[in-house]
Image: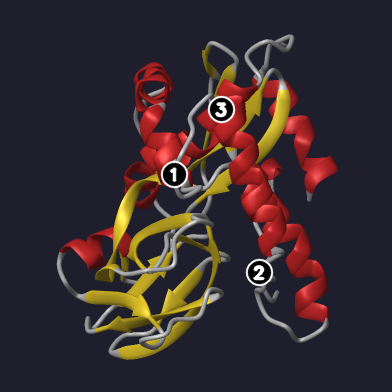
């Protein structure tokens, strides 16, 4: 009999016990098959100087950056990754595996509307991550752009509007409209969520809920990758929780997470 490979669904995963801090709940997920691909995460590659990310030219181009991978390994960059520096801060629009020893143009969104001038020639990793509202909006928009052969473009005006809304919601003004500045001002509150929702044991992903409302699932191919990504990913959803603290919170159970499989496949 021929074995048929299929995509992993929630029905295939082990759903752990929810952890809740204030109005944010994270539900551990595990059990998906591990990949044999040997890769580096973008933060590791940047810190080891195995990757350089810069503007595509001296004049720059808002919706794309140039990434040079000097390593002999693939580099994974996850959608929502924030890169700070150069002419303005950006976030990556989709997840990509960048080939070894290559030069690649990557599609990005600006998250610093009020600056267009060099602050260093190369980009550095941020300790923060794009909030779910921006990532979700980009993913929805890509359903259209990919059909139209426009790649992973973004609705830049909506991204700027989301950053402005966050700045207002969290009473964190910023001179250049920089998402990173907003999140840095609220780092203490974000850290409260991080300390309360820490990883225990094995796990390759998590489902997130704010006030009982499903926000999304982060799922990776191995425990080590998820462990390294978790603090940043949590910061992105913590921002959503901070903006909605006044709303009513519902209790999340593992059974409810399992029910999400049929609705979000």
Residue drawn at the location 59% of the way across and 44% of the way down: 163
Q: Determine whether 109 is above or below 61 in the image.
A: above
Q: Which residue has dot 3 on it?
A: 27
Q: Looking at the picture, how far across and down is residue 67, in whole percent?
A: 36, 80
Instruction: Find the distance from the CA under tag 2 to the CA under tag 3.
Output: 26 Å
Label 1 Cα crowd, 10 Å radius (few <14 / some 14-19 / many 20+): few
Q: Is residue 256 left or right of residue 31?
A: right
Q: Earlier in the sequence, mark 2 or mark 3?
A: 2
**Which numbered disc flags the more N-terminal residue, 2 or 1?**
2
Q: Residue at x 50, y 80 (%)?
A: 61
Residue occupying the point 48% across, 29% down: 172
Contact between marks 2 and 3 (CB within 8 A): the answer is no
Residue 211: image quadrant is: top right
Q: Report whether 130 appears left or right of 67.
A: right
Q: Nearer the viewer, residue 194 or 217?
A: 194
The quadrant of the rendering that contains the N terminus is: bottom right
Q: Is residue 63 above or below residue 205?
A: below
* Local secondary structure at mark 2: loop
Determine which quarter of the picture holds residue 86: bottom left
Instruction: Please tell me whether mark 2 or mark 3 is closer to you in this view.
Output: 3
Question: Upstream in the sequence, badge 3 or badge 1?
Answer: 3
- Name the element at disc 3: strand
**Position of residue 169 measured from the top left corner of the image (x, y, whole percent):** 61, 26
Quadrant of residue 156 in the image?
Answer: bottom right
Which residue sits furthest left?
Answer: 48
Image mark for residue 5 = 2
Q: Of discs 3 and 1, which sits in the foreground?
A: 1
Q: Residues within 10 Å of mark 2 (few under 14, many from 20)?
A: few
Q: Which mark is residue 175?
A: 1
**Residue 214: in sight, yes or no?**
yes
From mark 2 to mark 1, how far is it between C-alphas? 51 Å
For mark 1, give the secondary structure.
Answer: loop
């Amino acid at each position: 009999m021929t074995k048929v490979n299929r995509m992993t669904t929630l029905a295939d995963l082990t759903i752990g016990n929810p952890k809740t801090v204030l109005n944010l709940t994270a539900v551990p997920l595990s059990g998906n098959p591990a990949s044999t691909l040997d890769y580096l995460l973008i933060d590791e590659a940047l810190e080891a100087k195995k990757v350089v990310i810069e503007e595509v030219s001296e004049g720059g181009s808002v919706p794309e950056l140039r990434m040079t991978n000097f390593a002999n390994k693939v580099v994974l960059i996850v959608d929502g990754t924030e890169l700070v520096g150069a002419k303005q801060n950006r976030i990556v629009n989709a997840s990509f595996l960048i080939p070894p020893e290559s030069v690649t143009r990557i599609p990005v969104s600006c998250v610093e509307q009020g600056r267009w001038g060099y602050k260093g020639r190369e980009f550095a990793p941020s300790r923060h991550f794009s909030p779910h509202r921006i990532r979700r909006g980009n993913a929805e928009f890509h359903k259209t752009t990919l059909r139209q052969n426009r790649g992973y473009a973004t609705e830049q005006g909506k991204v700027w509007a989301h950053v402005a809304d966050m700045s207002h919601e969290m009473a964190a003004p910023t001179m250049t409209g920089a998402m990173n500045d907003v999140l840095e001002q609220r780092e203490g509150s974000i850290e409260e969520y991080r300390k309360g929702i820490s990883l225990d044991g094995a796990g390759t992903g998590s489902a997130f809920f704010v006030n009982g409302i499903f926000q999304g699932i982060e799922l990776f191919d191995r425990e080590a990758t998820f462990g390294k990504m978790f603090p940043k990913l949590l910061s992105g959803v913590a921002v959503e929780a901070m903006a909605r603290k006044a709303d009513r919170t519902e209790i999340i159970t593992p059974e409810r997470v399992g029910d999400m499989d049929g609705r979000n496949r």
